[in-house]
Image: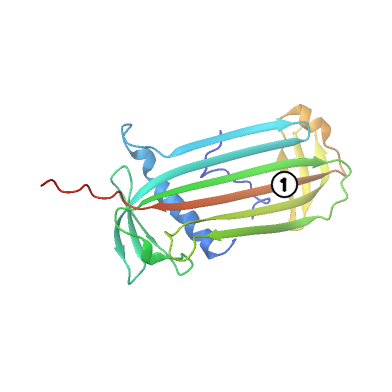
Amino acid sequence: MPSAQSFRVPFFVSSLENYMSAIKILAIAVAAALPLASVAQKQPEVSGAVATAPGQAKAVAAVTAEATVDKIDAATRTVSLKLPSGEMRTVVAGDEVRNFDQIKVGDKLKVKYVEALTLELKKDGKAVVGRTETGALDRSKPGAKPGGVARREITVVADVINVDEKAKKVTVKGAKGQMDLNIRDPEQLKLIKKGDQIQATYTEAVAVSLKPAPAAAPKKK
């Protein structure tokens, strides 16, 4: 099962914009120390799955983590986050993070990061070899708590230029050069021939939400 922080495929995955990078770093910062927490403390939710079919394969990984806003420095736009383990993490919210002034001490931050990779065999493929990238960004409305969803998708098409059945390797050539792919499944390897194409689609998405701190209980008279 792949982990959300280690699932990477060189060449096929070589940013959306600064916001995407910022919240992805924030997601990692929030999740980094959480596995060190005791069993009694809330752990980040990590999940993953791999599925295959003739000529196709897909892997998905996701992590969800939470933290509490402990301190805010408006002058430097720095936010200190307290993890369930008790450890602290400090992040800088750049100008691309809208509604910074709505962040309050005690607010609950929730981050969900998902990435997926799909590989598909195109028999006698005629598609244009190359790389395309699309992205979308949905930020919170003015006056609301900071948050949003960012999504990026990269599609790469490469030609199969050699199949080595003994070594269980397939050599593909894309716009930026060539590389060898290890194909461990013999049934999948049988399907791949020189002249075919392999299309890889990598998708990543980050969702960030900030919930207000619970209202203080009224003082007893």
211 to the left or right of 208: left
Point out the residue furthest to the left here: 221
**The N terminus - image quarter:** top right
Where residue 155 appears, x then y in whole percent?
72, 52
Point out the residue furthest to the front here: 221
Picture quadrant where residue 61 is located:
top right
Q: Amino acid at mark 1?
A: Ala
Q: Looking at the picture, does residue 142 appear above or below residue 154?
A: below
Point out the residue furthest to the top here: 187
Query: Which residue is depicted at the point 63% across and 49% down?
Result: 203
140 to the left or right of 157: left
Q: Residues within 10 Å of mark 1 (few under 14, many from 20)?
A: many
Query: Which residue is depicted at the point 53% across and 43% down?
Result: 6
Q: Could you say which is closer to the camera, residue 89 or residue 168?
A: 89
User: Which residue is denoted by mark 1 in the rendering?
Assistant: 200
Point out the residue furthest to the bottom here: 75
Where residue 42 appears, x then y in whole percent?
35, 37
48 to the left or right of 77: right
Q: Exactly how many numbered labels are in the figure?
A: 1
Query: Which residue is depicted at the point 68% across and 53% down?
Result: 154
Query: Which residue is depicted at the point 22% across and 47% down?
Result: 217
Identify the element where label 1 is drawn.
Answer: strand
Using the rendered image of the protein, determine whether residue 170 is visible from the camera's viewpoint. yes
Where residue 101 appears, x then y in whole percent?
37, 66
Using the rendered image of the protein, determine whether residue 32 is visible from the camera's viewpoint. no
Q: Could you say which is closer to the camera, residue 171 or residue 152?
A: 152
Color theme of the render: rainbow
Where residue 194 appears, x then y in whole percent?
86, 42
109 to the left or right of 15: left
